[in-house]
């Protein structure tokens, strides 16, 4: 009976907005950048750490799976990787250090092997990956 009640429960507004934005992260046009900005602004709001953690885990898993494909990441997967890198870089730009530090654990495989990022055939993905690594490194630094 509980499963039926959960299935009938309305999806929270924040979750619906996030799912809509996620669906546009694989678009090739400017809607990808708008979706990335929307996700970053939404997920860095105070009180949304669980949603932020879920997005970072999903993004890291998606990037890790796509990174294994190497040069075979073409089409929608390539655009999705760019969208995720853009979103994560924006999150680490806009977010507060105290809220982002616990999330770094979920990016472990991505930030532990920057050499794999440099071997990417796409210049845009390399640029965004390096941007993400720089912003993650800034979160690691202690404030002045």
Image (spheres, rainbow, N blue to C red):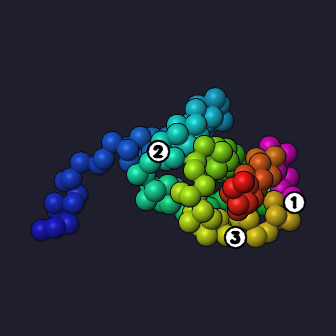
Residue 131 at x, y percent in the picture: 77, 48
Residue 137 at x, y percent in the picture: 75, 58
Residue depicted at 48% across the width and 60% down the height: 54
Residue depicted at 72% across the width and 54% down the height: 144
Instruction: Answer whether residue 132 is visible to the viewer in this image.
Output: no
Using the rendered view, name the quadrant where residue 33 is placed.
Answer: top right
Q: Quadrant of the N terminus?
A: bottom left
Disc 3 from disc 2: Cα separation = 26 Å
Label 3 or label 1, whichever lies nearer to me, is 3
Which callout, 2 or 1, points at the residue further toward the start of the chain?
2
Residue 118 at x, y percent in the picture: 87, 58
Range of magenta residues: 118-126
Which callout, 3 or 2, points at the residue further toward the start of the chain?
2
Q: Mark number for residue 119?
A: 1
Marks 3,1: beta carbons within 8 A: no
Residue depicted at 64% across the width and 50% down the height: 92
């Amino acid at each position: 009976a509980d499963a039926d009640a959960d299935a009938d429960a309305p999806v929270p507004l924040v979750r619906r907005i996030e799912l809509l934005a996620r669906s546009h992260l694989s678009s090739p046009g400017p809607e990808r950048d708008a979706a990335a900005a929307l996700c970053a602004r939404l997920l860095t709001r105070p009180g949304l750490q669980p949603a932020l953690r879920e997005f970072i885990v999903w993004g890291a898993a998606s990037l890790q799976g796509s990174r294994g494909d190497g040069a075979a990441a073409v089409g929608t997967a390539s655009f999705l990787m760019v969208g995720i890198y853009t979103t994560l870089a924006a999150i680490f730009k806009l977010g507060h250090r105290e809220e982002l530090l616990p999330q770094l654990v979920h990016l472990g495989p991505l930030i532990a092997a920057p050499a794999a990022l440099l071997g990417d055939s796409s210049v845009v993905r390399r640029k965004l990956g390096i941007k993400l690594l720089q912003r993650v490194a800034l979160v690691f630094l202690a404030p002045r």
